[in-house]
Structure formats: structure tokens, C-alpha cells
Amino acid sequence: MSTSPTTDQVEQPPIHVQGLEKSFKQLKVLRGVDIDVARGSIFALLGSNGAGKTTVVKILSTLLKADAGTARVNGFDVAAQAARVRESISLTGQFAAVDEVLSGRENLVLVAKLRHLKAPGTIADDLLKRFSLTEAGTRRVATYSGGMRRRLDIAMSLIGEPPVIFLDEPTTGLDPEARIEVWQAVKELAKGGTTVLLTTQYLDEAEQLADRIAILHEGRIIVDGTLDELKRLLPPAEVEYVEKQPTLEDVFLTLVGAKTEKEQR
């Protein structure tokens, strides 16, 4: 049976979320989240620890059920068509899910075989080349650097060419050089037409990668826009000796701080 969405579904955003709510006992984690992600774009969901970013990803990847609201991924309802959603996505968590005993190539071949794909060796070699891992392909993953493991992890998630990929804080714990390696890999995904939803607490990561950025604070999206649109939310740049443009960090701290202060009154 084909898992391709219908024409009407294709015309919808590949990720559409409306009124999403989720509580754990008395703790309200999501309080009505609305998100639309354009096809072939990188969308960054930015927020502090505990803001609800991972909860959103778990609901969209069918690992968790929402209490209220609707969500569609690749045109399929995450609640009513969970199997179709799972066939349309790939999820990369906060820690690389690779087998350190196997080589990089063996990891890729294994996943391709588990997905019953033809020519798993060819698929593995193509992905090793795409992620600049060809020379390291025959080495055990235990010898890889953090950046190489994460690139391999992302490569594994692309086997089967899913149209939508979720990256949940993909550079957590990586050094600056490894983070840049992962950033380049993510940019290449979008260039290839993959729709990427990225969660992060690193402001510079969202600034470097995202076509659009949403700030999730205390279970709600408090702002959603391009980097330039978010910067325009602050007062115009002041010119003294040099012109200082607001950074994404300025926007985030101003909006979150103002929201928190207002709620405490």
C-alpha cells in the first residue's frame, strides 16, 4: 500500500500543528501550540530546558499522544494515521544511536537491510560520501569523534529518504568544531528538499540554520517568524561609534523575560 499523501495533503504544510495540549498529571507542558512548517525548510523550535520542545517532537513522531489539538505530518494525522506518519519521518534524538562495535558502513547497511531496501551497500556508500565519511567508513564507530558520530546518526536517519526529519537538540554535548560539522549536514538536508524541524536551546544554532524560528515558553509559542522579523520586535539599532544590531539572544531574553515578569504580577 502506498504511503504517499494525496494531492490535497501535499498542498498542506508538511508539518501542521494546531491547539496542541499535553499535561503530565498536574503539570501542563503544552498549552495550545500552533506550528506550520514549509516544505523543504528548516524550522527551529527554540526554548529553555523544560519548555516542552521534546514533548512536541514526541507527539509529532507518534511516540506520545496529545491531550487536545491536532497535528499532521506529511499530510497524515498523527493520531488517526500513526503508521503512515512513521513511514514518512525520521527522528534523531539528543544522543547518537549508533552501534560502536560496527563500522560506519556496517551501521548504514544494517539499517538499510532492516528497512528491506534494495542494494544496501550502495545506499551506505552514497551516504558516507554525502556526509564526508567515506575514509572513515570501514573504521569502528568507537574511534569516531563526536561530530562524526552525529553525522553518521543523521545519515542513518535518511535511509529510505523520509520527507520529514525531526532533530531533537542534535548538537548537545558537541564541541564547537563538531557543531559546525552537524550544521553543514543539516543545511544539506534542506537543500535536498527534506523538511527539518529542529529543537534547540542554543540561540546561535537557530540563528545559523533556521528559515523560521518559534520560541516556545511555558508551553506556548510566544513568537514565530524569520530571524529578521524577530529582530524587528526590538527597538531600532542605536548608532554611537558603531551600529549594534540586536542578536537572536537579545530577542529571546527580552521576550521570555517580559513574559515571565508579566505572569509573576
Image: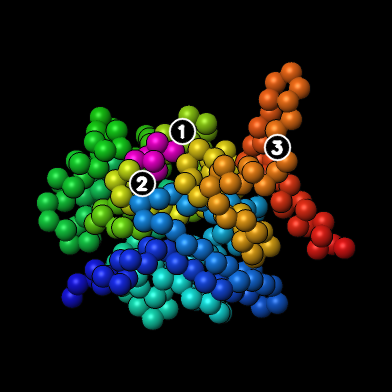
- The disc, 3 or 2, on the residue closer to the chain's N-terminal end is 2
Q: Position of residue 71 (x, y in %)?
A: 46, 72
In the rendered image, which quarter contains the N terminus?
bottom left
The residue that disc 3 covers is: 236
Q: Residue at x 48, y 29 (%)?
A: 177
The residue that disc 1 covers is: 180
**Left or right: where 26 falls relative to 209:** right
Q: Secondary structure at mark 3?
A: loop
Looking at the picture, which amino acid does disc 2 mark? Answer: Ala
Q: Position of residue 45 (x, y in %)?
A: 54, 54
Near-viewer residue (154 or 71): 71
Q: Tell us which disc is closer to us: 3 or 2.
A: 3
The residue that disc 2 covers is: 190
Image vertical order of residue 168 relative to residue 87, above or below? above
Numbered range of the magenta stretch: 183-188
Q: Evaluate if marks 2 and 1 touch, with contact meaning CB atoms under 8 Å apart.
A: no
